[in-house]
Amino acid sequence: MPCLKIFTNLTNSFIPNDFVNKIIPVLSKAVQKSPEKFICLISPDCALSIGGESSTPGAVATLESIGNLGPSQNKVIAKEISDFVEKELGISKDRFFLTFYDLKNFNVAKGGITVDVLEP
Ligand SMILES: O=C1C=C2C[C@@H](C(=O)O)NC2=CC1=O
């Protein structure tokens, strides 16, 4: 599944309960894949230093997808996700770091079956 993982120094009480669901349509539109395929997890209360500063809100995130990533797509995706994270979590864009991983289909499995077999 295309998967966004966010690690943040925000405490759990600052993460809206519906955050992981609300971001799915944003991901779906930005990555151009159907919403039911997406996973989002957020890990709060992380010890996180960005440039020696650990008390200001910040986050490090990874986005994994089989395709639909690349130099032009990533520019759009980065903007959409960082806008949403800033609006919903109050994390400024200069303290939000996103890394993209374009996965091979044989390196992802769902229900115990690799995606090259699931979606040949
Ligand atoms: O990363 C991806 C993972 C999957 C699994 C499969 C599915 O859920 O149907 N399709 C996927 C697309 C991806 O990009």
Image: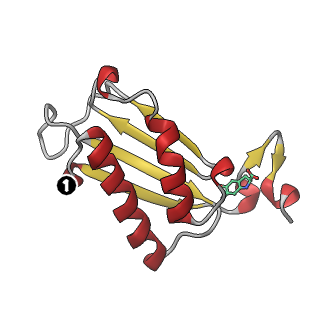
Asked if the beta carbon under badge 1 is closer than 8 A to the nearest atom of ligand 1, the reply is: no
107, above or below 39, in the image: below
Type of amino acid under label 1: Asp
Residue at (60, 58) in percent of width and height? 65
Viewer-nearest residue: 120 or 51: 120
The percent coordinates of residue 64 (x first, y second) are 55, 54
Residue at (61, 48) in percent of width and height? 38
Residue at (39, 55) in percent of width and height? 81
55, above or below 26, in the image: above
The percent coordinates of residue 109 (x first, y second) are 76, 47
75, above or below 52, in the image: below
- Count of labels shown? 1
- Mark 1: few/some/many CA within 10 Å (<14, 14-19, 20+): few
Q: Is 36 left or right of 100, judged from the image as shown? A: right
Q: Where on the image, by quarter, is ligand 1? A: bottom right
Residue 75, image quadrant: bottom left
